[in-house]
Image (cartoon, rainbow, N blue to C red):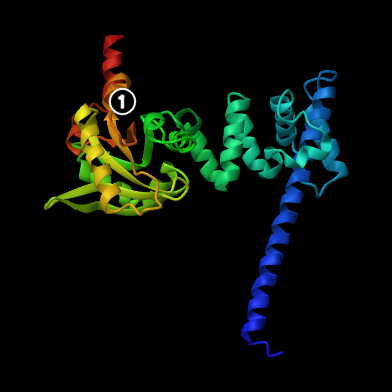
């Protein structure tokens, strides 16, 4: 056989894919075995911990490292984390036969991810959320840390929407969980006065971080997306397509508190996209109205009788004082002098 033949090249691609698949399965199996070992180690430590003094973990760490000098994970800190790991989950999701341990979400993500989750989560419900999100989105440890820091668990699915009345189930539930409140754009730094177009431009210039905050499934289609209706020009702030919801998503930015008129304008834009952009097999277009502030009751009333699916959320970014205002503020030294004078 000629090794440059298309048949050989096709077979080689198939073989490489097979090897990668085996490597991935092997890596998962190794990780699962390590997590199970840490679970059992934490359990054994907890069962003996109360019978010994405060030096127990320190002595244990030294004894284990002396016996297994090449083995990682036997430091005082990691032994303490193993115990914390066991204590956190011992009354819930891991009460399964040992043979089923590898099927648990904790066994399918690296130890570093697990440490972040059980050390930062308030309860099992929150931990399960981050476990599932990590698996579904294939988050790196840095991304997971960012999502925990931004309180994703508290924000997910909290937007005010009319999805239950405008979308069929289960799409309404999926769309509900897609939205957050508030959206945190901490990768943006803005100096007053904040103009909507400046905010929009920053979001687009940081599109990868913007997409991460929006969540899995959003594909960016355009900024100031042009539509012509009855001879008049209209421009959507941001247009996306959601690959999981199978629909277009219009995002409108309002650098003020929410007022009901905004919902009416967004409803019009959704009608226009459904008529001019939406393909026959696409689901109804969804709108997200992002404001600096809102009253939830007022937002619910505004969306109640609209026939297009939309949600209202707040958004936040890092605010920087303008130079002229900075110069007018007292320095730390000046404040200290004032306090001395008061004393």
- The residue that label 1 is drawn on is 304
The x, y position of residue 109, in whole percent, is: 66, 44
Image vertical order of residue 47 relative to residue 194, above or below: above
Give the farthest residue toward the front.
Answer: 280
Image vertical order of residue 330 relative to residue 269, above or below: above
- Whether residue 178 appears in this view of the structure is yes
For the residue pair 137 and 76, the one nearer the viewer reads as 137
Quadrant in the picture for residue 178: top left
- Whether residue 201 appears in this view of the structure is no
Q: Residue at x 42, y 28 (%)?
A: 158
Q: Residue at x 42, y 42 (%)?
A: 213
Give the farthest residue toward the right.
Answer: 67
Image vertical order of residue 258 relative to residue 17, above or below: above
Location of the N terminus (image quadrant): bottom right
Q: Residue at x 73, y 41 (%)?
A: 103
Give the farthest residue toward the top.
Answer: 343
Q: Viewed as shown, does residue 340 lie left or right of 265? A: right
Q: Viewed as shown, does residue 183 lie left or right of 16? A: left
The x, y position of residue 189, in whole percent, is: 31, 41
Q: Viewed as shown, does residue 30 lie left or right of 250? A: right
For the residue pair 34 and 278, the one nearer the viewer reads as 278
Quadrant in the picture for residue 190: top left
The x, y position of residue 229, in whole percent, is: 16, 50
The x, y position of residue 290, in whole percent, is: 30, 35
């Amino acid at each position: 056989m000629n090794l440059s033949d298309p048949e050989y090249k096709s077979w080689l691609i198939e073989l490489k894919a097979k090897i990668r698949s085996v490597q991935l399965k092997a890596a998962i199996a190794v990780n699962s075995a390590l997590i199970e070992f840490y679970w059992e180690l934490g359990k054994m430590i907890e069962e003996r911990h109360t019978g010994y003094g405060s030096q127990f973990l320190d002595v244990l760490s030294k004894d284990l490292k002396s016996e297994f000098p090449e083995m990682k994970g036997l430091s005082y800190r990691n032994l303490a984390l193993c115990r914390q790991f066991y204590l956190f989950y011992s009354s819930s999701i891991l009460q399964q036969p040992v043979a089923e341990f590898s099927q648990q979400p904790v066994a399918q993500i690296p130890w570093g991810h697990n440490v972040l989750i059980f050390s930062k989560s308030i309860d099992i419900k929150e931990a399960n959320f981050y476990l599932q999100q990590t698996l579904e989105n294939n988050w790196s440890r840095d991304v997971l840390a960012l999502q925990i820091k931004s309180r994703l668990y508290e924000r997910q699915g909290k937007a005010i929407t009319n999805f239950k009345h405008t979308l069929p189930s289960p799409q309404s539930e999926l769309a509900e969980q897609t939205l957050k409140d508030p959206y945190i754009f901490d990768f943006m730094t803005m100096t007053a006065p904040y103009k909507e177009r400046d905010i929009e431009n920053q979001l687009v210039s940081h599109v990868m971080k913007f997409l991460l905050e929006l969540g899995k499934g959003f594909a960016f289609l355009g900024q100031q997306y042009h539509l012509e209706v009855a001879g008049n020009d209209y421009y959507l702030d941001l247009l996306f397509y959601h690959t999981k919801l199978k629909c277009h998503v219009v995002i409108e930015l309002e650098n003020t508190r929410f007022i009901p008129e905004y919902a009416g304008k967004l409803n019009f834009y959704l009608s226009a996209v459904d008529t001019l952009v939406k393909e026959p097999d696409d689901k109804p277009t969804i709108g997200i109205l992002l404001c600096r502030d809102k009253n939830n009751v007022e937002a619910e009333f505004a969306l109640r009788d609209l026939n297009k699916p939309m949600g209202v959320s707040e958004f936040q970014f890092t605010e920087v004082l303008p130079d002229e205002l900075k110069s007018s503020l007292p320095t730390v030294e000046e404040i200290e002098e004032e306090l001395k004078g008061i004393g």
